[in-house]
Image (cartoon, rainbow, N blue to C red):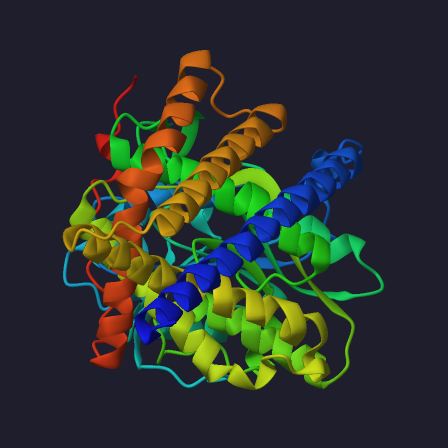
């Protein structure tokens, strides 16, 4: 056997083994998500959130919303946050040195004035230039902070320093929340008496083409454009399947930076968000879990499958590429910072299962897939078609399509946000098309993220948004 043949067999069987393990993971994730979702729906059917809404015993919450150049959406979204059904609440908007007129719009819209405010530096941050409250008692829950630009993590740390409540909710200021979102997110912190809930996340959905009035979602519509529509499917798959499965195992490593609640005391003890990574949301959750594991304290990271938060998805490949580039770099940075956990029994399920899964199937998957596709192209160009590799790739694509269709069926049987049959059929069509258009682009963006990290290009990347005012009725 020549060395070329030997390398060919090693490569082919290695890819085959990797694909089989990945498919098994898909099946297990699907099974666990069904069990956990069913348990949640059964348990939640007896909950009366009206009691929690008016209760003074509900956990005190502080919403932290960093804002950088969000003038197009900030007024409506702050209005949305102020209208949430929750008794013990403060809303903290952190203007992270915006170059547009975000602060001026807030001052005008909410009749703000500068106050004397002592900021307790639990976590070191960039300087705070001013803290604002409203003359209007209707907006008594609102606090606006103006600070020197330092990035999202630094802005969140300022919010943590200023917050007075036991729990804080991190939200992107461009998001719109359901009216009962905080009530549902607070529930895990109340109901678990044997384990300390250190963080809880909620489902994030795509708001493109939805009808939004006065900062409220009034009608759900499937996105008209292809990119937001395929991201709708992607988000259903990620939140309703993957995160529900990991919640079942208590092995969740990620709470979306767009919407998540945290135990403020534990976050401060852990040192707050890390401003030196672009994946600050994932890194904080992993660090908090490490902190609890190292102290042998019983804890849990929970996830709520209800559609609670709606966000505007990128509508161009340019903006989407920046986002996925950043997500890839954030994943790599987090795994690198916490590499001590890898197959370390001291960290329990976190070290023995969660970390290895993210390493092999979140970080390495795009790299393996990229070089697999590249090798097939090279073989075809030199006239030596690798039929084994082609069959493996076709099998993986088919399993991926079936997995997406299963996610759509889970959505229909549970929360059924897209009630028109033609919208479900459109999602099915997207599931078939996604592996050939959207997914290769995401893989390439992840590869570029790896390259940029090696070249020490650590920029966030500008995320231009249309704003919800631009959403029209369908």
Q: Give how far across and how far down residue 434 sits, in percent.
A: 34, 37
Rendering quarter of residue 289: bottom right
Q: How many marks?
A: 0
Please name the residue shown 73% across and 85% down the image. Answer: 295
In this orientation, does residue 147 appear?
no
Q: Is residue 365 left or right of residue 29?
A: left
Give the quadrant of the N terminus: bottom left
Q: Is residue 180 left or right of residue 319?
A: right
Rendering quarter of residue 357: bottom right
Please name the residue shown 69% across and 46% down the image. Answer: 32
Please name the residue shown 26% across and 32% down the image. Answer: 226
Q: In the displayed structure, would residue 417 be above or below residue 347?
A: above
Q: In the displayed structure, would residue 33 be above or below residue 295?
A: above
Q: Nearer the viewer, residue 316 or 207?
A: 316
In this orientation, does residue 202 appear?
yes
Give the quadrant of the C terminus: top left
């Amino acid at each position: 056997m020549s060395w070329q043949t030997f390398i060919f067999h090693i490569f082919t069987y290695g890819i085959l083994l990797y694909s089989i393990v990945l498919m098994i993971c898909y099946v297990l994730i699907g099974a666990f998500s069904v069990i956990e979702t069913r348990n949640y729906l059964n348990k939640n059917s007896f909950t009366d959130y009206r009691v929690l809404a008016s209760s003074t015993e509900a956990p005190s919450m502080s919403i932290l919303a960093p804002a950088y150049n969000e003038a197009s959406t900030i007024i409506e979204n702050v209005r949305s946050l102020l209208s949430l059904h929750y008794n013990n609440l403060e809303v903290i908007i952190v203007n992270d040195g915006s170059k547009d007129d975000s602060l001026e719009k807030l001052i005008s819209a909410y009749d703000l004035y500068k106050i004397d405010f002592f900021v307790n530096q639990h976590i070191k941050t960039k300087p705070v230039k001013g803290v604002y409250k409203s003359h209007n008692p209707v907006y008594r829950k609102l606090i606006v902070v103006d600070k020197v630009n330092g990035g999202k993590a630094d802005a969140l740390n300022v919010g943590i320093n200023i917050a007075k409540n036991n729990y804080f909710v991190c939200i992107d200021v461009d998001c719109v929340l359901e009216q009962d979102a905080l009530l549902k997110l607070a529930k895990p912190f109340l109901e678990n008496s044997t384990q300390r809930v250190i963080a809880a996340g909620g489902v994030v959905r795509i708001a493109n083409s939805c009808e939004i009035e006065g900062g409220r979602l009034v009608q759900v519509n499937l996105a008209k454009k292809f990119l937001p529509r395929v991201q709708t499917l992607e988000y259903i798959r990620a939140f309703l399947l993957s995160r529900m499965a990991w919640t079942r195992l208590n092995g969740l490593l990620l709470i979306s930076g767009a919407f998540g609640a945290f135990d403020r005391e534990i976050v401060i003890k852990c040192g707050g968000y890390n401003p030196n990574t672009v994946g600050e949301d994932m890194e904080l959750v992993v660090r908090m879990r490490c902190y609890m594991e190292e102290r042998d304290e019983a804890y849990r990271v929970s996830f709520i499958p209800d559609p609670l938060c709606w966000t505007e998805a990128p509508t161009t490949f340019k903006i989407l590429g920046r986002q996925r580039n950043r997500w890839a770099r954030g994943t790599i940075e987090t795994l690198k910072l916490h590499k001590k956990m890898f197959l370390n029994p001291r960290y329990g399920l976190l070290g023995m299962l969660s970390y290895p899964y993210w390493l092999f199937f979140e970080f390495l998957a795009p790299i393996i897939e990229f070089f697999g596709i590249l090798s097939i192209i090279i073989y075809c160009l030199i006239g030596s078609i690798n039929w084994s590799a082609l069959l493996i790739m076709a099998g993986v694509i088919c399993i991926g399509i079936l997995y997406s269709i299963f996610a759509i069926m889970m959505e229909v049987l549970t929360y059924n946000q897209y009630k028109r049959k033609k919208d479900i059929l459109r999602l099915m069509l997207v599931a078939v098309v996604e592996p050939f258009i959207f997914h290769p682009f995401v893989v390439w963006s992840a590869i570029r993220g790896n390259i940029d990290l090696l070249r020490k290009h650590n920029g966030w990347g500008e995320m231009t948004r249309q704003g919800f005012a631009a959403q029209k009725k369908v």
